[in-house]
Amino acid sequence: MLLETLDEWRDGCNLAADLAWQSCQTKSAVQKLAYEQIRDETALGSQHAVLACHETARAIKSCMERLQNGKKASKPRFTSRSITYDTRSMNVFSERETVSLTTLGDHSRVHADLCLPEADEGYQYEFLDSEEWDYTESTLHYREGDWYLHLGFRKPKADDTGSTTTNGTVLGVDLGVNQIAVTSTAQFFSASKLNHARREFEKTRNGLQRTGTQSAHRTLEERSGCERRHVRHVLHTVVNGIVEEALEYDCDGIILEDLEEIRTQLPEADWHSEWAFRTLKSYVEYKADIENIFVDTVNPRNTSRRCAKCGFTADSNRTKHEFECQACGNQNHADYNAAKNVAEQYLRRGQQPSRRRGVSQYALKSGSRTPS
């Protein structure tokens, strides 16, 4: 399983190099360009597809630096039997001296013993048994029938030491029907173009199904793949905007609505499906992780009916996309009001993210806001 994973990893890195060479060299740019194609053309899981993009970006950057210094360099080719792991694709169990490694897909893993020297001889225990060090990005190598894991360690950042400071900030995000997402900073991501595209795909699909020929069936499969790629592209754009908003407002976390609940809340949303919600959440998670931003969820119950200003909750507060509190008269766009409630619900819950500074506020813009 590990050997097969190595082969797919090399294919993924080489694919990213072909796409990104002389085009981009930052992790985020290579990932944006190559991630989807790696997922489509290899058996790598989502996190290893991300790591392959990052490994390729490092290699391209190194080549570009050589060229800038007057040295020779060509497009990187990945041939060695090694693969990168991180804390999301590998677990190290120091007390049992074992390691768990993700293989192909997102849920398939192998478990192996760490072959270490005796405790009084091995420096490795200074890291494995110490609370001052965390394992981080590491490299697995295969050489002459043996496996070597080069474990990377780092000291936790100052903000990762369990500090109880309460000056952290979160960004609330509401998912909706007419808006794919709205943030507590009044950033609107409209669903109108995506809804239109989905309806056009639906018309084409119905026509091909009525035709019923073998050729129509093949075309139907091709169109289905095209539709899914289009939705992924739109979701990527939305997620990039959400993460950029979090960075602009120096947010420590992004708070989404719990997907188990939202499926029953938005049955009429043309753009949505269980797959679309899962995909959007996974994109937010891996892109936020790159920026060291945590992601959490809250139950969306009452977020659309509660006034973010005074807390009064009633069905009559909301009429379609308009919100007017029947208690205090606060008027606003309903989805923007809900986004603020999502963030505030997380703060009221009082459950702080582990290994990060505490949060006590959410990013917002005051006053009434509209999609324009």
Image (cartoon, rainbow, N blue to C red):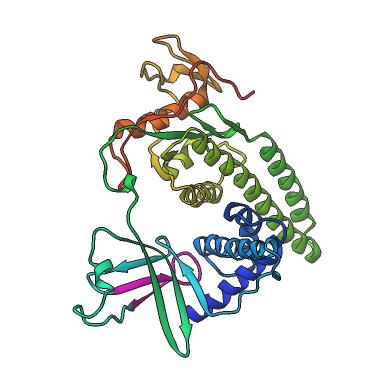
Task: Please tell me which residue is depicted at 57% across the width and 62% down the height of the picture.
Answer: 58
Q: Position of residue 284 (x, y in %)?
A: 51, 47
**Rendered position, 140 above or below 263:** below
Magenta segment: does it hold 102? yes
Q: Can residue 1 be seen at all in this image of the molecule?
A: no
Magenta segment: does it hold 22? no
Q: Nearer the viewer, residue 202 or 53?
A: 53
Q: Nearer the viewer, residue 235 or 273?
A: 235
Q: How many labels, in total?
A: 0
Q: Position of residue 264 (x, y in %)?
A: 46, 39
| Start-end of magenta stretch | 98-112
Q: Position of residue 350 (x, y in %)?
A: 28, 35
Q: In this rendering, would 31 be left or right of 227? A: left
Q: Position of residue 130 (x, y in %)?
A: 23, 63
Image quarter for residue 70? Answer: bottom right
Q: Can residue 90 be seen at all in this image of the molecule?
A: yes
Task: Please tell me which residue is depicted at 29% across the width and 60% down the height of the picture.
Answer: 133
Q: In this rendering, would 74 be left or right of 11? A: right
Quadrant of image for the C terminus: top right
Main SS of the magenta part reads strand
Q: In this rendering, would 18 be left or right of 8? A: right
Task: Please tell me which residue is depicted at 75% across the width and 62% down the height of the picture.
Answer: 217
**Rendered position, 341 above or below 298:** above
